[in-house]
């Protein structure tokens, strides 16, 4: 069965749950009186063979008929909850159902503007963590760091929360406060960190000239604006005395695959593999390749990474190391090496589905294990308080030793 067929079948299942069956199944008719289900309209489009939903409708009727607070039985919320439960049963934190409101928030995120604290969060070994605090946001100013474990959100334990439930609790209107109970490696006990929410406008990059010959480029995310912003920066760099590059991907939680391919194409030869999309048991693989302009392909360079480097950041870092033997400096990356596809559903809802895994050009899986740096350099709390950056210092030292 092709990937397209599998996704289509999954969408059919979701549509069936969301809009209901008008005729039911034989088992259901034989066990339950054939009373109509309130609030459900028959708009059946397709039905997978061998799936018996009689248990689902049995539970639906029981809840609708006997739950102590019938006013809480909101039909649309129950449908969304049923779909979310189906998705969550897969055990993949990156396969997610979005209600219309949640989808709108997701789209705002990738466009780079939203209200909240400005931190990318994720699950690692079942623990909710900070993947990366975004640049110049309340999360960064409050001192949150990549790898911080979120124990509680406003006194609510995160032990059984999904990523999206946690995001819903952390998000809020500008000017309001949220308290995160945080544990960090090296701490004896968790600490409460209070953060005032704000409007988050995430920049895509900044660059500056260091030592009169090093173009230091910091990429904050791979958003819709990153490709054009990088093109502008590249034009500016070409007019300077820069003859080598430090690419800083620290605390970059990722973004669009296509944008990482765009950026990689400035540093790799045309035709070089950027990433391999591996569909696993289905045996299908896609190769994404650099297509130019390759203007920085001969520049000596190094790449900075840390635990907040995830997703598209890891793709770019892995491609530069595999294709050009470029050294990674810093700390091990997050290990978010899977491909999500956003599929629109009815009434503005959507599914974000993990459809494949990412492999580096040499076939190394990024998923869960991350990328180990070639030169490991840690940043301590003491360094941060002293406003020191030993990782960047090492990158400057190494890149100046590289020859054309």
Image: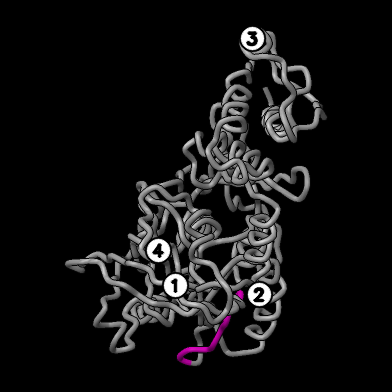
Q: Is residue 204 magenta?
A: yes
Q: Position of residue 265 (x, y in %)?
A: 65, 62
Residue stretch in magenta: 203-211
Task: Report the side of 21 relative to 306 (left or right).
Answer: right
Q: CA distance from mark 1 to mark 4?
A: 7 Å
User: Which residue, given by chain and number where applicable, does mark 3 sit on?
Assistant: 27
Q: What residue is pinned by disc 2? A: 230
Front position in the image: 183 or 275: 183
| 290 with respect to 338 (left or right) | right
Which quarter shows the N terminus? top right
Q: Are marks 1 and 4 in contact (CB under 8 Å)?
A: yes
- Which residue lies under the disc numbered 1? 178
The residue depicted at 65 percent of the width and 83 percent of the height is: 238
Mark 3 falls on what kind of element? Answer: helix
**Lateral position of residue 201 relative to residue 12, left or right:** left
Tell me the mark number nearer the camera, choosing from 4 and 2.
4
Point 31% across, 80% down: residue: 390
Q: What predominant SS class does the magenta segment belong to?
A: strand
Q: Residue at x 73, y 29 (%)?
A: 20
């Amino acid at each position: 069965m092709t990937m397209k067929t599998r996704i289509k079948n999954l969408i059919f299942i979701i549509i069936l749950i969301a809009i209901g069956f008008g005729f039911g199944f034989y088992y259901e008719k034989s066990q339950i009186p054939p009373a109509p289900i309130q609030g459900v309209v028959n708009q059946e489009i397709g039905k997978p063979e061998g799936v018996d939903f009689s248990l689902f409708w049995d539970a639906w009727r029981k809840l609708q008929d006997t739950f102590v607070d019938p006013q809480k039985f909101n039909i649309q919320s129950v449908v969304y909850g049923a779909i979310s439960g189906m998705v969550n049963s897969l055990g993949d934190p990156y396969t997610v159902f979005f209600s219309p409101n949640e989808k709108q928030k997701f789209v705002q995120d990738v466009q780079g503007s939203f209200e909240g604290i400005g931190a990318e969060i994720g699950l690692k070994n079942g623990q909710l963590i900070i993947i990366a605090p975004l640049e110049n946001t309340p999360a960064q100013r409050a001192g949150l760091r990549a790898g911080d474990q979120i124990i509680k959100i406003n006194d609510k334990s995160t032990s059984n929360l999904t990523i999206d439930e946690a995001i819903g609790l952390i998000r809020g209107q500008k000017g309001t406060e949220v308290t995160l109970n945080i544990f960090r490696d090296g701490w004896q006990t968790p600490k409460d960190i209070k953060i005032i929410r704000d409007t988050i406008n995430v920049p895509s990059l900044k660059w500056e000239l260091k030592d009169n010959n090093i173009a230091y480029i910091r990429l904050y995310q791979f958003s819709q604006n990153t490709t054009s912003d990088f093109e502008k920066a590249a034009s500016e760099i070409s007019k300077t005395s820069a003859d080598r590059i430090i690419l800083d991907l620290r605390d970059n939680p990722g973004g669009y695959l296509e944008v990482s391919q765009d950026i990689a194409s400035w540093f790799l030869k045309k035709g070089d593999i950027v990433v391999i999309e591996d569909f696993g048991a289905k045996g299908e693989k896609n190769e994404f390749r650099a297509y130019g302009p390759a203007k920085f392909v001969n520049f000596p360079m190094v790449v900075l990474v840390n635990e907040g480097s995830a997703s598209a950041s890891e793709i770019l870092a892995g491609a530069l190391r595999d294709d050009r033997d470029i050294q990674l400096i810093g700390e091990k990356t997050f290990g978010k090496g899977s491909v999500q596809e956003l599929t629109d559903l009815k009434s503005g809802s959507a599914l974000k589905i993990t459809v494949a895994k990412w492999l580096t050009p040499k076939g190394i899986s990024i998923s869960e294990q991350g990328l180990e740096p070639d030169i490991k350099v840690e940043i301590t709390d003491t360094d941060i308080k002293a406003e020191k950056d030993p990782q960047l210092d090492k990158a400057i030292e190494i890149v100046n030793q590289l020859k054309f």
